[in-house]
Image (cartoon, grey):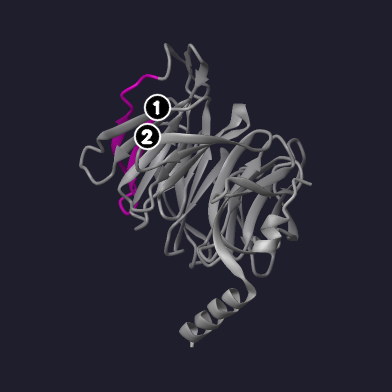
C-alpha cells in the first residue's frame, strides 16, 4: 500500500510539472529572514520574512516542513515556526522559551527539541503543535542532535554542564545519561549509526570524539594549524592576525567517511574511516565560519561566513571553495533540502 501511494505521489508530481531541486535554506541571525537559494542556478528563490533573529533550522527526512526558531533577542519568549517548503508560507507559530538556538527534529517530524536560554530544552509535539515537556540541562542550551532512527536526542548546552545529555525520545523524553567533555560544548555532529558523537569544545582547536553507548570520550583531535598566537579565553578563542578565532561548525559527510571542522577562517577535513582520524585537507575562507552543512549527495559543502554575510560553496570532492553567495545579515545555521517546486513559481521569485 505504501509503495502504491508513493507511485501515485510521483505521478502527480510529474503530471503537475513539479521537479525536485536542491535548495539552501540560510537563516539571518541579525535580520528577520531566511534566504532560500536554488543550488542548480545559485539564485535566490525568495526571502522568507519570519521575524527577528531567526537562528535554528531543521527539517524531517521527507522535507515536508521546515522548522525555524526565532530568537527575538532580549525578549522573554522566542518562537518555533512551521514553514511549507513548497509554498514558502508560514503555517504556524508557537511561543517557546527565550532565545531559542539550534533545534533538531526526529526524522519523522513528530517532535522538535528547542534549546532555550532558561536552562531547558523545550520539547514540541509538531503534529499537535504544543509543548509537551521541558528538559532541564543547566547552562545555556545551544545545540541539538537527532539520531537517524529517531530514538535518541543529544543535547549540547554551553557552560558549566560541560557535557551532552542523552534522551530517550520514545520513553517519554526521558534522560538516560550524560557524556562528559573537556569543556563547554559547542556544535556537535552525530554519526548515522548514532554511536559516535563528534563535539566541538571551547578552548580546543579541534574536536573530541565520544562513544555514545559507553558515554565516554575516546579521542581528542587537534588541528595541525594553530588558530592564533595565544588563547585569550576558553570561550572567546585564539587571538591572531585576523582577530579572535574559535571553532563553531562541525559536520559529517553523507557517506560517513569524513568529518569537517570549521575553526575561525579554517576548514579542516579529517578521515573518519582511519583509526587516527588523519587530517586530509585544510581550506581557508574569506572570514570566520559559523556553521556547515552538506548537500544530500555529498558533492557540496556550505559554510556560513557570519561576518561577511555570505555562504562559501565548497566542492567537497576537490576540497576547493568554488564561490561565495550573498545572503542575509549575520548568517548562521543552514540546511539543504531537495524540494519539489513548480517551475513557474521558482522563476517568479522575488526578494520581496
Determine if the magenta segment contains residue 213.
Answer: yes
Q: Is residue 110 visible?
A: no
Q: Which residues are magenta?
A: 204-226
Q: Is residue 102 visible?
A: yes
Quarter where residue 117 is shown: top right
On the image, the x and y values in percent for residue 199 come to 41, 40
- Marks 2/1 in contact by CB < 8 Å: the verdict is yes
Please give the residue where the numbered disc 1 appears in the rendered image: 204
Residue lying farthest to the left in this orientation:
275
28 horizontally vs 302: left or right: right
Q: Is residue 278 above or below residue 68?
A: above
Q: Nearer the viewer, residue 291 or 118?
A: 291
Please give the residue where the numbered disc 2 appears in the rendered image: 207
48 horizontally vs 177: left or right: right
Mark 1 is surrounded, within 10 Å at the Cα level, by few (under 14), some (14 to 19) or many (20 or more) other residues, namely: many
Mark 2 is surrounded, within 10 Å at the Cα level, by few (under 14), some (14 to 19) or many (20 or more) other residues, namely: many
Q: Residue at point 47% right, 22% down? A: 234
On the image, the x and y values in percent for residue 99 come to 68, 41
Quarter where residue 332 is shown: top right
Q: Residue at point 60% right, 50% down? A: 57
CA separation in Å, label 2 and label 1: 7 Å
Q: Residue at point 20% right, 42% down? A: 275
Amino acid at each position: 500500500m505504501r509503495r502504491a501511494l508513493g507511485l501515485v505521489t510521483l505521478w502527480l508530481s510529474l503530471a503537475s510539472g513539479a521537479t525536485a531541486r536542491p535548495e539552501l535554506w540560510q537563516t539571518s541571525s541579525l535580520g528577520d529572514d531566511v534566504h532560500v537559494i536554488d543550488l542548480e542556478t545559485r539564485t535566490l528563490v525568495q526571502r522568507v520574512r519570519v521575524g527577528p533573529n531567526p537562528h535554528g533550522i531543521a527539517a524531517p527526512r521527507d522535507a515536508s516542513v521546515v522548522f525555524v526558531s526565532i530568537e527575538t533577542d532580549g525578549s522573554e519568549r522566542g518562537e518555533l515556526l512551521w514553514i511549507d517548503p513548497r509554498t514558502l508560507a508560514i503555517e504556524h507559530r508557537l511561543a517557546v522559551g527565550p532565545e531559542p538556538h539550534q533545534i533538531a527534529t526526529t526524522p519523522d517530524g513528530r517532535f522538535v527539541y528547542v534549546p532555550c536560554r532558561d536552562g531547558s530544552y523545550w520539547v514540541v509535539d509538531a503534529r499537535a503543535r504544543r509543548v509537551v515537556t521541558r528538559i532541564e540541562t543547566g547552562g545555556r542550551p545551544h545545540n541539538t542532535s537527532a539520531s537517524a532512527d529517531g530514538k535518541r536526542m543529544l543535547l549540547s548546552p554551553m557552560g558549566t554542564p560541560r557535557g551532552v545529555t542523552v534522551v530517550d525520545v520514545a520513553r517519554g523524553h526521558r534522560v538516560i545519561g550524560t557524556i562528559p567533555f573537556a569543556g563547554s560544548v559547542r556544535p556537535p555532529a552525530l554519526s548515522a549509526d548514532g554511536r559516535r558523537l563528534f563535539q566541538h569544545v571551547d578552548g580546543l582547536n579541534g574536536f573530541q570524539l565520544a562513544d555514545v553507548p559507553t558515554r565516554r570520550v575516546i579521542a581528542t583531535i587537534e588541528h595541525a594549524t594553530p588558530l592564533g598566537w595565544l588563547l585569550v579565553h576558553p570561550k572567546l578563542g585564539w587571538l591572531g592576525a585576523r582577530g579572535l578565532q574559535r571553532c563553531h561548525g562541525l559536520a559529517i559527510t553523507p557517506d560517513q567517511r569524513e568529518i569537517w571542522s570549521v575553526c575561525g577562517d579554517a576548514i579542516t577535513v579529517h578521515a573518519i574511516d582511519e583509526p587516527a582520524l588523519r587530517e586530509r585537507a585544510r581550506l581557508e575562507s574569506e572570514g570566520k565560519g559559523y556553521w556547515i552543512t552538506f548537500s544530500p549527495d555529498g558533492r557540496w559543502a556550505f559554510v556560513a561566513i557570519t561576518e561577511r554575510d555570505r555562504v562559501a560553496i565548497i566542492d567537497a570532492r576537490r576540497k576547493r571553495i568554488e564561490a561565495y553567495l550573498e545572503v542575509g545579515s549575520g548568517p548562521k545555521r543552514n540546511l539543504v533540502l531537495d524540494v519539489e517546486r513548480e517551475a513557474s513559481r521558482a522563476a517568479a521569485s522575488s526578494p520581496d
